[in-house]
Amino acid sequence: MDFFNLPPISTLQAVAYFAKSGSLTQTAQAMGISTARVQQHFYALEAQLGSQVFDRRGKNLAFTENGKVLAEDLVAGFSTITNGLRKNVGIVRPASVCITTPHCMSFNFMMGLLPKFRQKFPDIKVTLNPLAPDEDIATWDSDLLITSVDAGTRPELSDYLFSSELSLVASKDLVRKFAQLGVSKLPLVLERDPCQPANNPDLKAFLEKHKGPIDTVSEFECLPMILSGQAAGILDSYLVREQLAKETLVRLKVLAPRRDYVVTKKSAFPDAPITTLVAWLVKELSPEPEKA
């Protein structure tokens, strides 16, 4: 087979779309055709190549070993073509983007977004750079930075993500259980860094009245204990915003003023791809209004 005797471009696109999404439905939607038409493209390709590209078992569709090799080559080929066209019109998409975030956000949210990110931006390799608890954020050296600022503050080249506040939260089941037992002292777990009583009068007053067991743990240990109903805890509310919205948690007390979280980009990046990326992050991370 030579350059002038290739399968139709739409057939090759169908294979590449399926390789990236793993879904006939998503492939059909991306191409604006029916799933039956996508299958026709696949059968036509196998007929022209004289070999099996797909393994069909009932309603399941997967690539054969030869099909996987073909799919990888097609995805890479279309990526090269796309990048060449972008360069021709002055849009250069970076090969990789490093995102610096608070370590709790990296582990609790950004890692969960990576599969969606790869599907949305297959040409960009993203890496996460979680900030260490004592690391100076002013020295950040990455392409994008997600961090908190005073409410209403908008640093240069930044876009708003969401607002948050330091809150005492607990599972409703835990509160209900202790209320039924007539016990007013909830077991507490505290996040180490933002929970310094000496710097927080509201928190200090609460702890002085609280006689229950108190453990100081990391954010990674704290959140699972709260969500599982083992303890109450003090966290940035963005960490539990989805659970609050689903009413699985209750906010017992707001302990600190509202803060805004923003994503900041470096000016060296071309506008088009980074603007698209930031807009996607803003959409993915912006929560629904929280219930008090």
Image (cartoon, grey):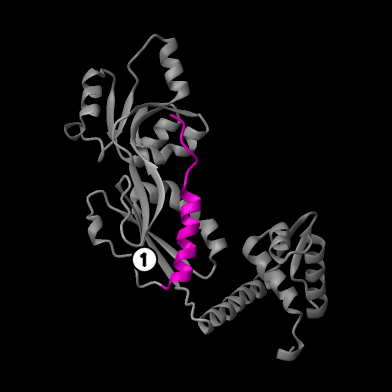
Q: Position of residue 99 (x, y in %)?
A: 38, 60
**Relative depth, front residue between 277 and 116:** 277
Name the magenta segment's main secondary structure.
Answer: helix
Q: Please, is residue 19 above or below residue 1 in the view? A: above
Q: Please, is residue 209 above or below residue 13 in the view? A: above
**Relative depth, front residue between 29 and 257:** 257
Residue shown at the point (79%, 61%) measured from the top left: 34
User: Which residue is disc 1 drawn over?
Assistant: 143
> The disc labelled 1 sits on which kind of residue?
Asp
Residue shown at the point (55%, 82%) measured from the top left: 84
In the rendered structure, the answer to whether residue 256 lies left or right of residue 77 reads: left
How many residues crowd around disc 1 within 10 Å: few (fewer than 14), some, or many (20 or more)? some
In magenta, the rendered stretch is 270-292
**SS for dot 1:** loop
Identify the image quadrant of the C terminus: top left
- Magenta residue check for 290: yes
Residue shown at the point (61%, 77%) measured from the top left: 78
Identify the image quadrant of the N terminus: bottom right
In the rendered structure, the answer to whether residue 259 lies left or right of residue 207 reads: right
Q: Position of residue 270 (x, y in %)?
A: 42, 73
Residue shown at the point (71%, 69%) measured from the top left: 14
Q: Picture quarter containing residue 116?
A: bottom right
- Magenta residue check for 275: yes
Q: Position of residue 9 (x, y in %)?
A: 72, 78
Identity of the residue furthest to the front in this view? 152
